[in-house]
Amino acid sequence: MEKMKMMLVDDEERFLSTTQKLLAKKGYDVVTASSGVEALEKIRIHNIHVVILDVKMPGMDGNATLKEIKRQFPLVEVIMLTGHATMESAIDGLKSGAMDYLMKPTDIDEIILKAEEAFGKRQGLEEKIRVARMRKLVKSPSEIIRES
């Protein structure tokens, strides 16, 4: 079974390093990015499954980053990370394809729970894609009989 690869995106370096260390101690593979542009570059390089994305960042904000992630990498699941002042932005993110959101400050177990749910959703989608591709490749018994 494939192991989840997670990405944390936040402009607060302290949050990134602390959270990455805590997740690594629990056995998770975590990549970090401090901007939306950096996140998109790293998603291209690493096979990222789940992104924990801060809404409020300078430059390319979380919602713009989310839209670009979903356009370029539609199977990547995104969880928005928001403070109280940006709740409307988190809701906009849900409308733009985010799976869920977390309120700051959040605890590590909550991040893990949401990330595992997102990874499960992605695995379900990947399985549906595999089945659909196999159906195109493999003929049904009735198709084989008709062709004989």
Image (cartoon, rainbow, N blue to C red):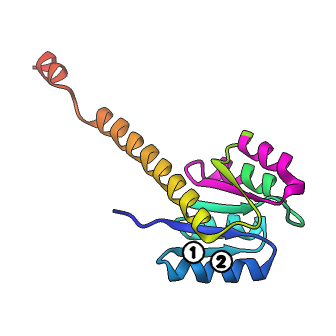
User: Image check: 72 left or right of 120?
Assistant: right
Q: Residue at x 85, y 65 (%)?
A: 57
Residue 19 got which mark? 2
Give the amino acid at mark 1. Answer: Val
Q: Is residue 72 placed above or below 34 in the rendered structure?
A: above
Residue 30 got which mark? 1
Mark 1 or mark 2: whose residue is earlier in sequence: 2
Query: Could you tell me residue 66's position as x and y percent?
Result: 73, 53
Query: Mark 1, mark 2: which one is toward the viewer?
Result: 2
Q: Residue furthest top?
A: 146
Q: Residue at x 63, y 47 (%)?
A: 99
Q: Is residue 1 placed above or below 77 in the rendered structure?
A: below
Query: Could you tell me residue 45's position as x and y percent?
Result: 58, 70
Query: Could you tell me residue 28's position as x and y percent?
Result: 50, 74
| Quadrant in the picture for residue 2 | bottom left
Q: CA distance from mark 1 to mark 2?
A: 9 Å
Residue 84 among those drawn in magenta: yes
Closer to us: 85 or 30: 85
Is disc 1 in contact with disc 2, using a CB cutoff of under 8 Å?
Answer: yes
Residue 52 among those drawn in magenta: no
Element on which disc 2 rests: helix
| Quadrant in the picture for residue 130 | top left
Element on which disc 1 rests: strand
User: Image check: 77 left or right of 37?
Assistant: left
Where does the magenta region start and end? 68-94
Q: Residue at x 57, y 67 (%)?
A: 109
Closer to us: 130 or 13: 13
